[in-house]
Amino acid sequence: MGGISIGGVSVSYAGNRIIEKLSLTIKDGAFFTLLGPSGCGKTTLLRTLAGFLPVDAGEILFGNTDVTLWPAHKRDIGMVFQDYALFPDKTVFDNVAYGLRARKRDETTIRARTGEYLERVGLSGFESRRPAELSGGQRQRVALARALVIAPQVLLMDEPLSNLDAKLRVQVRETIRDLQKEAAITTVFVTHDQEEALALSDAIGLMRAGRVEQMGTPVEIYSMPVSAYVADFVGAANVIAATTQVYASKGADVEVQMAGARIVARSVTDIPAGPVKVLARQEDVQLYAPETGSGIPGTVFRRQYLGSRTHYKVRFESDGPVLSVERTGLDHGSIQEGAAVRVVLDKARTLVVPR
């Protein structure tokens, strides 16, 4: 089938430039997620891939085929929308079969493939129902079956889980991932939900103001964010102002001054001497008793017990930076609000980026 290549694409909407010279490559058969907040350009890019919006510049290739100027109906895509976009007057069977009938498939093939995909999404026996008789999760499964039954070259999904409750979201996203893997269809999935992105994706493109801030696997995005924006958007990270007196190359250990102490962390990119930001995931911060002597002294001013984990807020000084700390297990119950502690940052997992 081939993957997707986007080369130098610029897109405007309502007279405003939304995407500027964006380039990226999505591997054949990959589940690729465009992640980011509202207004970052992710849905605009998806609609451009679908052929609903024209490009101002650049090119889009599906495999080796340039589809930049092709209309949507010629791009061989399956599309799943946030609001399901089902035909209210058609049965479940006819909704799923619609794309096959539009492609003039014979009735035997239509019945066989439609029945097969309704079974795959767990809706056998629902063929004669109409969308109004289904739950939100069932409607989204119908929309998924309709998109996949035509065996498209590319599957595009625009926040398809956002209208479902938390439990249904998990169930439907597992169905989506299972079917996508089985069909090996190159998929572009749009969401603002970091958990969905981490759980589903082979690769993630985190967008910011019409460009990709970072692209990588879920592990790379989470464990090696290239900026404070990435660290803060994907997972909860402490972002602390600091300074360094020396230049550090990418990947090197660098000593920084932070909260009146010196710590060693790893540079994400080339770091010039001067102001920097320290990034530390809240689960990578350790709290110890004051008498241990190591670490930065601080005070716990908030503690929230959350069952399997406990969340702390620690202030280094009376007017100093505040650190979020999350510890799992039951061994941290002895640390109460008002307790003096020493904070130790994991050198291997604490990162430094330019301010």
Image: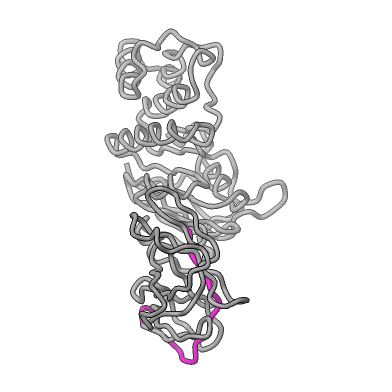
Going by the picture, which residue comes out furthest to the bottom? Answer: 245
Residue 251 on the magenta segment:
yes
Using the rendered image of the protein, determine whether residue 64 is visible from the camera's viewpoint: no
Quarter holding the C terminus is bottom right
Q: Residue 225's spot in the image, x, y percent?
A: 44, 66
Task: Count every numbered label the image shows and give the total.
Answer: 0
Q: What residue is at 40 percent from the left and 68 percent from the top?
A: 285
Does residue 70 appear left or right of residue 173 in this picture? right
Quarter holding the N terminus is top left
Using the rendered image of the protein, determine whether residue 279 is visible from the camera's viewpoint: yes
Give, as a single range, the part of the protein colored magenta.
236-252
Q: What residue is at 35 percent from the left and 36 percent from the top?
A: 174
Q: Is residue 326 above or below residue 242?
A: above
Q: What residue is at 56 percent from the left and 15 percent from the top?
A: 88
Residue 276 on the magenta segment:
no
Q: What residue is at 36 percent from the left and 76 percent from the top?
A: 347
